[in-house]
Image (cartoon, rainbow, N blue to C red):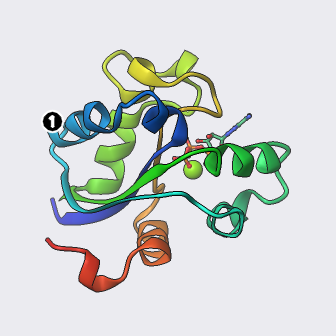
């Protein structure tokens, strides 16, 4: 299995509850390595750009408001099959449907305030990493 990268966000509901370390620990225990990390306050423009694929969805405006409501931690994660590995440990979008032992089952507050983002394909991982990080900020 190839070592690949994915992009992760620890969302405002999690940073507000001081869960950055707890979430990162679960990512690391799932076999992912944090090769880049920074705490930022997303601008509205950044949120709307990042979630551009969801622009026509009914939850788009609320989602952008939520993602700019407090600090987030953006990360690049590296590991075998990183995209799928990360999505497995994240759990289902709606925490009500998330499996035991996943980040969202453990910590998410709602379908919107669901503690983490993770890229959904290798192609999107590259786009999302490039959106927030320059190459010199990633140390593998
Ligand atoms: P993510 O992109 O954040 O990793 O999560 P995902 O693939 O599981 O979910 P996606 O369908 O891509 O939706 C992106 C984010 O939008 C919020 N959402 N709200 N109110 C709603 O019905 C609703 N549905 C989705 C969540 O924060 C979700 O993670
Ligand atoms: Mg998604």
Work out whether 24 lies above or below 109: below
- Which residue position is annotated with label 1? 29
Judging depth in this view, the residue of 68 and 130 nearest the camera is 68
Q: Looking at the image, how many numbered discs can be counted on the residues?
A: 1
Q: Nearer the viewer, residue 60 or 18?
A: 18
Establish if 87 lies above or below 75.
Answer: above
> Residue 85 in the image: x percent, y percent?
29, 45
Residue 94, how many percent across, how many down?
Answer: 59, 26
Q: Residues within 10 Å of mark 1 (few under 14, many from 20)?
A: few
Identify the residue shown where x is 63% and y is 29%. 111
The N terminus, quarter of image: bottom left
Q: Would you say 23 lies left or right of 98 here?
A: left
Is residue 125 or residue 81 the one in the foreground? Answer: 125
At x 24%, y 65%, the residue is 4
In the rendered view, tell whether residue 102 sits above or below residue 62: above
Where in the figure is residue 124, as x and y percent of width and height?
Answer: 49, 68
**Residue 7, percent from left and from top:** 39, 60
The residue that appears at 43% across and 20% down in the rendered structure is 105
Q: Is residue 107 left or right of residue 13?
A: left
Question: Quadrant location of residue 34?
Answer: bottom left
For image coordinates 60% across by 32% down, the residue present is 113
Q: Quadrant of ligand 1?
A: top right
- Secondary structure, mark 1, is helix
**In this rendering, position of residue 44 left or right of residue 39:** right
Quarter of the picture containing the C terminus is bottom left
Q: Is the shortest distance between ligand 1 and the CB of mark 1 under 8 Å?
A: no
Q: Left of 39 or right of it: where is 16? A: right
Q: Quadrant of residue 81?
A: bottom left
The residue lying toward the viewer, choosing from 75 and 30, is: 75
């Amino acid at each position: 299995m190839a070592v690949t990268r994915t992009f992760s966000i620890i969302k405002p509901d999690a940073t507000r509850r001081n869960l950055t370390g707890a979430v990162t620990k679960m990512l690391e225990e799932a076999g992912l390595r944090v090769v880049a990390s920074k705490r930022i306050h997303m601008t509205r423009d950044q949120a709307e750009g990042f979630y551009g694929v969801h622009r026509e969805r009914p939850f788009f405006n609320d989602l952008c408001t939520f993602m700019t409501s407090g600090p987030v931690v953006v990360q690049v994660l590296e590991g075998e099959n990183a995209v799928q590995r990360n999505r497995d440990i994240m759990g289902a979008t709606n925490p009500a449907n998330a499996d035991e032992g996943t980040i969202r089952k453990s910590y998410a507050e709602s379908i919107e305030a669901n503690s983490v983002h993770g890229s959904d394909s290798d192609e999107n991982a590259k786009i999302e990493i490039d959106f927030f990080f320059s190459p010199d900020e990633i140390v593998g």
